[in-house]
Amino acid sequence: MEKDVSFQGNVPGMITIRSNDVVLDRGGYTVSGSGFTGECVVATGVQNVVLRNGTLRNAGKFGGGIDLEGVSNSIFENLSLDGQQLRS
């Protein structure tokens, strides 16, 4: 990422990862939003995912923060979950 990103409204997955071998380096930037009922980052049935160097913010607005279902061989480092959850 090259800047902070903010979303508004009901978005099921602000960032959805559907492929293997994905690196999402936030570069220290923040993903935030308001009015959400879904998750901020969703990944299902993939492998070799790397999430690093950033913040998920807006406590109580995302359903789960990061939702990982069936994700394997992955790395999550240097992340700040401001009022968020990590579900797997």
Image (cartoon, rainbow, N blue to C red):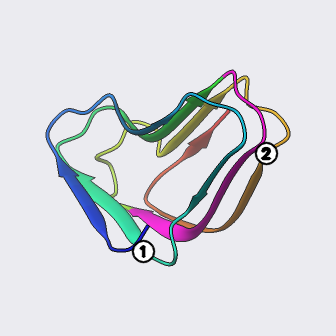
Q: Position of residue 70 (x, y in %)?
A: 73, 23
The amino acid type, in three-letter code, at marker 1 is: Tyr
Q: Name the residue under label 2.
A: 74
- Residue 53 sits inside the magenta stretch: yes
Q: Name the residue under label 1.
A: 29
- In the picture as drawn, the residue positioned furthest to the bottom comes out as 28
Q: Is residue 35 above or below residue 12?
A: below
Q: Is mark 1 on a helix, strand or loop?
A: loop
Horizontal side of residue 53 vs 7, given as left or right = right
The chief SS type of the magenta part is: strand
- In the picture as drawn, the residue positioned furthest to the right comes out as 73
Magenta region: 45-56
- Residue 66 sits inside the magenta stretch: no
Q: Where is residue 52 in the image (x, y as percent from the top left)?
A: 63, 64
Seen at 78% across and 41% down, the residue is 48
Seen at 50% across and 67% down, the residue is 26
Q: Which of marks 2 and 1 is nearer the N terminus?
A: 1
Q: How far apart are marks 2 and 1 (CA)?
A: 21 Å
Judge the density around disc 1: few (<14), some (14-19), many (≥20) Cα neighbours within 10 Å: some
